[in-house]
Amino acid sequence: MSALLASAPLWLILIGMVILRRSAILSGAAGLALAIVLALTAVEPAEGVAPLLIGVAAEAAHSTATIVWIIFPALALFEFQKACGAIIRIRDMLASVTGDRRLQAILIAWFFGLFMEGAAGFGTPVALAAPLLVGLGYPPVRAVVLALLGHAAGVSFGAVGTPVLAQVTISGLPAQDIATRTAAMHAVCAPVLLLVMVRLADDAPLSGRILAWTAFAAASFLAPSLLLAALIGPELPTLGGALIGAAVFIAVLRRRSSGKAVRPRGLLADLAPYVIILLLVLVTRLIAPVQRTLADLSLSWSIGGDYSGAFQPLYHPGTLLFLGLFLGALGTGRLRLLPGALSASIRRLVRVAFTLLVMLMLSRLMVHAGMIGTLAAAAASVGPAWPLLSPFVGVLGTFITGSATSSNILFTEFQISTANRLGLPATDLMAAQGFGSAIGNIVAPHNIIAGSATVGLTGREGEVMARTAKPCLIYTALGGLLTFGWLQLAA
């Protein structure tokens, strides 16, 4: 099979979503149907078509369930916090800290956007931050651009690490290794992204004072984010980094400015679920006896030796999210809001689950039918320069699907196969993939359309993309240079 034919399902998804403006599930289903036709005609798998399709369906259903087990409580937590008004109070507190427009942009688009990305993901940060920025006086186009740029550095670990955990589910590589390398890439490159955001936040030239605050804001998030990735894994770099970073930044800002009084005690109940989740992840990942006890319970299955899966119900991040949500609701006397939050999240979850299932079936079919191997062979012809291009694959995946998780699902096996053919460390290309899929959020049509709709910009989405395309290109190129440089030094 030629590389062009093997890539046809991906091109069909690209055409369906970008040109025809069809949904991810319809475009993905069309790509899956084409992949099945290719498997029936051009591939002729050795084990037969029926065993191939059964095995692929089993692996896709298993992976979908393990990912949904994270997304469900993440969405429920967001719905719960929205129902009790916590989201609005947290936003208002941040906006009240200072009257400086650029510092407000840092607090809302950077820290609040990253916080919501770590807690919920899936477009939530832009939908929440953009209207608040408009309320603070920003023009709608600029507000959406700032919200998109502000949350992007945390997308690799959004919704409590879901994009990286999807990579782990497919690749079997150590989660902590992928998380550390991905966080390190953002730690080097994200200050540039934040500087671009701050420059766009106001027409006045950047002053030395604002540059200093920008550098401090970058360090306040990126330092704890990298530390959490290295010590814990993919669950906390964005959520924990944003919580710690915002607390440090606000504390210093309050000492040096004349903003309105902040009342942190009133926010304790609002922040309780997040703090409990943070503590649960720390306990289960850092205390060895607890970690072993929880991780030892594993449910596994296999079909014919070629298809398999495993699930650790007590160690899984989704279980910790459910527990944190329940304890937070119980401890703050808001338990009555939980049934409604769960119902609302289920309604949102159905479409997400079907989309993930379709994308995962396509991904696993392309792997087992040899299509990914064919594409990897073509990519390997680029030779040692491939690391320069690997983050752009992540951007392409997110541009097509609108989701960093879906991008990683589509291209994880491709990056691994390419790494193996070139003799490169697979973990480094996994990090480049996750890095690219994160920044791809700022040019993904789905995210731009959703964010624009919240501030009345329907029909003007092109203006937003025109402003985010260049930062995306610069950031991705920096990631490629960084990956290439690291591998050259390690050689």
Image: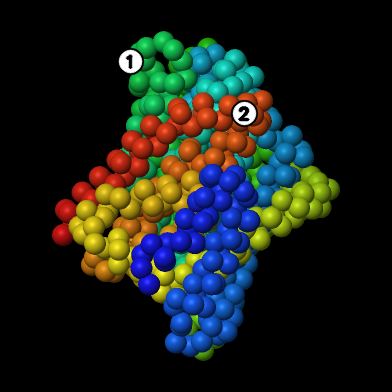
- Counting from the top left corner in percent of width and height, residue 4 is at 38, 62
Report the residue at 56% width, 36% height from top.
448
Report whether 258 appears left or right of 343. Answer: left
Report whether 408 appears left or right of 486. Answer: right
Report whether 267 appears left or right of 36. Answer: right
- Counting from the top left corner in percent of width and height, residue 385 is at 22, 53
As helix, strand or loop, the secondary structure at mark 1 comes to helix
Which numbered disc covers residue 334? none
Is residue 144 something that shows in the picture?
A: yes
Residue marked by disc 2: 459
As helix, strand or loop, the secondary structure at mark 2 comes to loop
The foreground one among 226 and 37 is 37
Residue marked by disc 1: 208
Task: Indicate the quadrant where residue 91 lies.
Answer: top right
The foreground one among 86 and 366 is 366
Q: Nearer the viewer, mark 2 or mark 1?
A: 2
User: What's the image's color scheme?
Assistant: rainbow
Mark pair 2, 1: CA separation: 38 Å
